Amino acid sequence: MRRKGLATAYLKEVLTEAKKQADTCILHATSAGKPAYEKLGFTAVNEFDVYRRRNRDGK
């Protein structure tokens, strides 16, 4: 469903409500949606890596 405007439409609705409650909106997301986020005025302010450690039994 990429490149059909669904994420942008959804985010616009969410931002409409968020603007009523706060001056700043923070989005924690993957880089896959970066074009949609930037189109709506979001700018990257930080990046981080996620690490995982598995025990020997795989849990």
Image: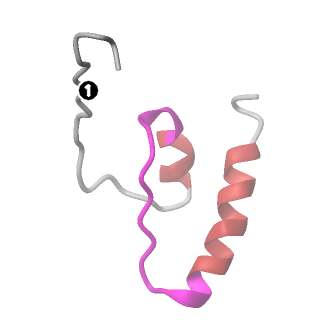
Image quadrant holding the N terminus, namely top right
Residue type, numbered disc 1: Arg
Q: What are the residue bounds of the magenta stretch?
A: 19-33
Q: Which quadrant of the figure has residue 12?
A: bottom right
Q: Is residue 20 above or below residue 38?
A: below
Q: Is residue 30 magenta?
A: yes
For residue 8, side relative to residue 6 (left or right) = left
Residue 42, percent across and down?
44, 59
Residue 21, percent across and down?
55, 88
Residue 48, percent across and down?
22, 41
For residue 53, side relative to residue 30 (left or right) = left
The structure residue drawn at horizontal position 55% and vertical position 59%, both measured from the top left corner, is: 40
| Magenta highlight: main SS | loop
Residue 14, percent across and down?
66, 67
Image quadrant holding the C terminus, namely top left
The structure residue drawn at horizontal position 24% and vertical position 44%, both measured from the top left corner, is: 47
The structure residue drawn at horizontal position 42% and vertical position 78%, both measured from the top left corner, is: 24
Q: Which quadrant of the figure has residue 25?
A: bottom left
Q: Is residue 6 magenta?
A: no
For residue 11, side relative to residue 27 (left or right) = right
For residue 37, side relative to residue 3 (left or right) = left
The structure residue drawn at horizontal position 45% and vertical position 46%, both measured from the top left corner, is: 29
- Colouring chosen for the image of the structure: secondary structure
> Of all residues shown, which one is farthest toward the front?
57
Q: Is residue 33 above or below residue 24?
A: above
Depth order, front residue of 41/10: 10
Local secondary structure at mark 1: loop
Q: Give the residue at mark 1.
A: 52
Total label count?
1
Within 10 Å of disc 1 (Cα), the crowding (few <14, some 14-19, many 20+) is few
